[in-house]
Image (tube, grey):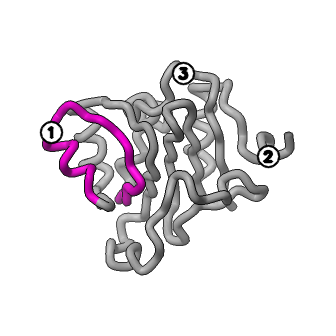
Amino acid sequence: MTYGLIDRKSHKFYTHMRTVFQAIENVQKQYNWLITDLECYPKNKDIEQFLEQEYCWLSGEELTDIVAKEDFQWIWGCLCGFQKDISLEEVLKHSLPSSEDYNGYYQNPVSLQHPLSSVEIVPCDSSWILIISKDKTIIDSYMKKYPKSEVLSTFNQR
């Protein structure tokens, strides 16, 4: 089963990953991350050049280190987390995820965009964030910290 939330009410800005990572109790470190369709503007030029690629493949520790160096705003993007035993080669056998071109987040039941991912974090237009996960504790942790978030299945019924 897959679980999801949308947060449009808890923050002035929704795409500062440090607060997202804190809310999910830093479980991002347990995954490898494929980052695609990214729009962001870090001041650190090394980070900016790295993230400007068509896609980035990072360990959870590397992603956490980037955010620790600079907690810049993520405007658009699709961050797909994979179990550590799934290789980049396996991941790239599928289409690269898109933050704007996927409707499965808004359907009931909610679904992950990449067929091999376990969790997806999708900053959307600097105004809200989606978190979709096979692990309900990730959703529960975020909702505990930010109770104004909406469960996607509830959101979809409106």
Q: Confirm whether the magenta stretch covers residue 48.
A: yes
Is residue 153 found left or right of 145 in the rendered image? right
Q: Is residue 83 above or below residue 66?
A: below
Q: Position of residue 43 (x, y in %)?
A: 20, 31
Of the image marks 3 and 1, the number of the one nearer the N terminus: 3
Q: Confirm whether the magenta stretch covers residue 153.
A: no
Q: What quarter of the picture does the C terminus occupy?
A: top right
Q: Which residue is mark 1?
A: 45
SS at badge 1: helix
> How dense is the environment of label 1, judged by Cα within 10 Å: few (below 14), some, or many (20 and up)?
few
Q: Amino acid at mark 1?
A: Lys
> How dense is the environment of label 2, judged by Cα within 10 Å: few (below 14), some, or many (20 and up)?
some
Please give the range of residues in magenta.
Answer: 32-53
Q: Position of residue 87 (x, y in %)?
A: 34, 74
Q: What quarter of the picture does the N terminus occupy?
A: bottom right
SS at badge 2: helix
Nearest the viewer among 138 and 92 is: 92
Of the image marks 2 and 1, the number of the one nearer the N terminus: 1
**Disc sitting over residue 11 in the figure:** 3
Q: Which residue is mark 2?
A: 156
